[in-house]
Structures are given as structure tokens and as C-alpha cells.
Image (cartoon, rainbow, N blue to C red):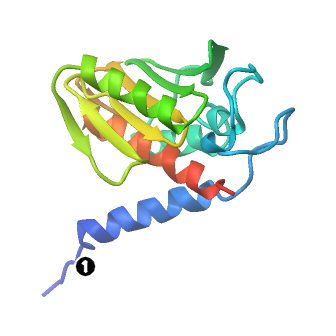
């Protein structure tokens, strides 16, 4: 009689994936003109210093690698980032559709919370999420918005198909995976 190896419980698999994501984010970001700082380390968005290193992480370093591994597919072109009006936007163009990751950098926690609340108020029905940043929710289109310190992260999946990746997963699963990956990386680089 042949015995089949037992599968680890889903909590074990989830814990292993989170540990791998955290390990991949352990290396510091490439040095640039700005000092390495998590989103909350900036004291003012009034002076436009360009995107923080934490914002830049959503488009470079280990985040794209982690997302490719999680979704089982690579973007058709390398992710491309833009910066305008204190909003860093990273576009992941896949053959099947587009994922947008944005980080809105605000002057302080109170301003970020007000911005987050405004987005939530205009989003229609939302599902609150616990354990991501200071507050988070998923919108009806599957996109996830996270408040963290003085930044608001959005994983916008409305331009992806209803099921995306290999194996296919729901848009909301994709956006929560994106948000979780970014939050882990930001936590790893917090002072």
C-alpha cells in the first residue's frame, strides 16, 4: 500500500510565503539621492523631494520579483514608475491586463488618514481588512487601499481580468497579495 505525503495546513503554507516575502525584502533598497526611509519618516510632503525610497520599492527591487512569483507570470515589460503631485504610480503591464500600484505621500498621518477616509467614502461598498497597515479595505472592483503612516497605498486591479495569474486567482486576492507584499517590505525597512 502506498501512502500519499500529507499536505501542510493552509496556515503553514501562508506563513511560509510570508516568511519568503520578508526574507526577499531584507536587503536594503539601492542607494539613491534620498535617504532610505519608510513612508512615515518624511515630515512634510510640501517640499517635493521626489518619491521616498519606500514608494520606489513598489516598482523596483524585490517587490516585482515577489509578485511575479506569487502570480506565476511576469509583466510584458519591466514595471514603470512616474511621480506627480506627491503620487508615485507604478504600472505593471501584463499580456492579460494592467495592475497599477500607487503610493500617495502626504504631509503627516492626519492628512493621510483624511485622504484615506475620503477615498473610502467615495468608493461605494467596501470590505474592511485587518492586519494591513494602519487601516485597509477592498473595493467592489477588487482593488485594495491601505493607510500606513503618512502614505496611502492602492493596488488597483480593475484593469485585470476577473481571474488573473497561474493558477488563476480573483482580483481581490491579487490586490491583497500586492498590498501584503508591499507592507512586508516597508516593515522590513522601517527604522
Q: Quadrant of residue 16?
A: bottom left
Q: Nearer the viewer, residue 144 or 111?
A: 111
Q: Nearer the viewer, residue 186 or 46?
A: 46
Residue 47 location (% of width, % of height): 75, 21
Furthest-front residue in this view: 110
Furthest-left residue in this view: 1
Identified at 27% across, 34% down, the residue is 138
**Residue 168 visible, this angle:** no
Residue 158 location (% of width, % of height): 31, 18
**Residue 47 visible, this angle:** yes
Q: Quadrant of the N terminus?
A: bottom left
Q: Quadrant of the C terminus?
A: bottom right
Q: Quadrant of residue 37?
A: top right
Identified at 24% across, 72% down, the residue is 9
The local crowd at label 1, few if under 14, some if 14 to 19, many if 20 or more residues have their Cα within 10 Å, is few
Q: Please indicate whether residue 30 sits to the left or right of residue 57 in the image.
A: right
Q: Nearer the viewer, residue 54 or 149?
A: 149
Furthest-bottom residue in this view: 1
Residue 32 location (% of width, % of height): 84, 35
Q: Nearer the viewer, residue 52 or 58?
A: 52
Q: Which residue is mark 1?
A: 5
Judged from the image, the secondary structure of the residue bearing numbered disc 1 is loop
**In the rendered image, the vertical position of residue 47 relative to residue 30, given as above or below:** above
Identified at 34% across, 28% down, the residue is 117
Q: Quadrant of residue 129?
A: top left
Residue 95 location (% of width, % of height): 43, 17
Identified at 69% across, 37% down, the residue is 43
Q: Across the whole image, how many numbered discs are drawn on residues?
A: 1
Amino acid at each position: 500500500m502506498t501512502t500519499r505525503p500529507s499536505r501542510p495546513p493552509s496556515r503553514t503554507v501562508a506563513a511560509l510565503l510570508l516568511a519568503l516575502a520578508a526574507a526577499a525584502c531584507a536587503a536594503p533598497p539601492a542607494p539613491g539621492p534620498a535617504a532610505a526611509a519608510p513612508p512615515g519618516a518624511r515630515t512634510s510632503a510640501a517640499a517635493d523631494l521626489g518619491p521616498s525610497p519606500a514608494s520606489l520599492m513598489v516598482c523596483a527591487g524585490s517587490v516585482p520579483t515577489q509578485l511575479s512569483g506569487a502570480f506565476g507570470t511576469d509583466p510584458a515589460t519591466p514595471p514603470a514608475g512616474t511621480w506627480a503631485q506627491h503620487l508615485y504610480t507604478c504600472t505593471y503591464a501584463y499580456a492579460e491586463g494592467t495592475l497599477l500600484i500607487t503610493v500617495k505621500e502626504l504631509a503627516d498621518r492626519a492628512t493621510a488618514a483624511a485622504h484615506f477616509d475620503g477615498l473610502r467614502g467615495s468608493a461605494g461598498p467596501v470590505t474592511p481588512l485587518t492586519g494591513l497597515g494602519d487601516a485597509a479595505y477592498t473595493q467592489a472592483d477588487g482593488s485594495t487601499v491601505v493607510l500606513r503612516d503618512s502614505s496611502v497605498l492602492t493596488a488597483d486591479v480593475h484593469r485585470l481580468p476577473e481571474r488573473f495569474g497561474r493558477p488563476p486567482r480573483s482580483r481581490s486576492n491579487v490586490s491583497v497579495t500586492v498590498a501584503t507584499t508591499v507592507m512586508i517590505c516597508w516593515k522590513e525597512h522601517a527604522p
